[in-house]
Amino acid sequence: MQHKIITAAAALTLITGNASANHVDFMTDGNFNISGPGFTVVAGDSANILGGTRYVGIDTVDGASSASLMAGNDFIDFENDVNAAGVLTLDYGDFMGGNGALNADFDTDWDFVSVSFSDVVGDGVLSVSFESSNGAGSSASMVVDAAGTYSFGFDDAGFSMVDFSDIDRVTVTLMASADSDFRITSFTREAVPAPSSLALLGLGGFCASRRRR
């Protein structure tokens, strides 16, 4: 007899369902290739890029910096040579050349945003800012020095004036050291599981463990 193993991820999907898409940018479309200083605005599927357009800008001092999302890849590659101190900006929503205000609800289903990196060489400083109908704010900065997911809670003091129920614009800024390379794989909205969800996740893990024996 075959037994179905319920993973934690599967259990969470069963609990939460698909209340709304969690994407800001899945980094799957809107291809581009630029060198800094410079910028580009690219269009993509609104199911993958919130608002349907992504602004990409690079500022650099000395040396050379570049950013790209090439066909067939699912990441933005941001690279700085040995002399460059580059700054990458990703903008969504109400920027010049975009599709206008997002009018997006980040409040009802979500508690924080996350930026994920599949590869990091060197280090950088990451921050996120929001503009809403009633106010704007920027997060505290976070050092990025290894692959992984870096999250910013909506309770950050820098967001005290932000109305997360009506977000018009959201911006990611990554200030990178010289001789560095970053692969950014996603920018998403996330939720903290409810206590009952956590309990079910624990039960799912227990069941999986029992069935492996």
Image: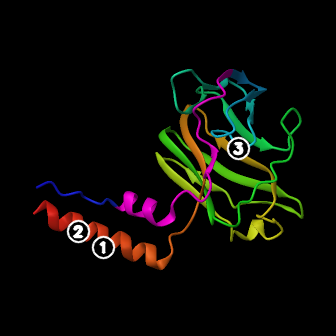
Name the image quarter holding residue 123: top right
Q: Which mark is residue 69?
A: none
Which numbered disc flags the more N-terminal residue, 3 or 1? 3
Q: Residue 207 bears which disc, if any?
A: 2
Q: Name the side, left or right, on which 183 lies relative to 197.
A: right
Mark 2 nearby-residue class (10 Å; few <14, some 14–19, many ≥20): some
Q: Which residue is mark 3?
A: 50
Residue 18 lies in the magenta stretch? yes
Q: Is residue 64 magenta?
A: no
Residue drawn at x 51%, y 60% as measured from the top left: 17
Q: Amino acid at mark 3?
A: Leu
Q: How far across and how far down the image is residue 179, in percent?
A: 56, 31
Q: Residue 208 at what x, y percent from top left?
A: 22, 63
Q: Secondary structure at mark 3?
A: loop
Answer whether labels 2 and 1 touch (C-beta < 8 Å). yes
Residue type for callout 2: Cys
**Pointer 1 residue:** 203
Q: Gap in Å between the C-alphas at discs 2 and 1?
A: 6 Å
Q: What is the x, y in percent for residue 21?
A: 61, 51
Mark 3 and mark 1 residues within 8 Å of each other at the beta carbon = no
Which residue is at the front of the view, 29 or 88?
A: 29
Q: Nearer the viewer, residue 91 or 47?
A: 47
Q: Is residue 129 above or below residue 198?
A: above
Few, some or many residues within 10 Å of mark 1 (<14, 14–19, 20+): some
Residue at 29% x, 60% y: name it.
6
Q: Amino acid at mark 1?
A: Leu
In the displayed structure, does residue 182 sit left or right of residue 111? left
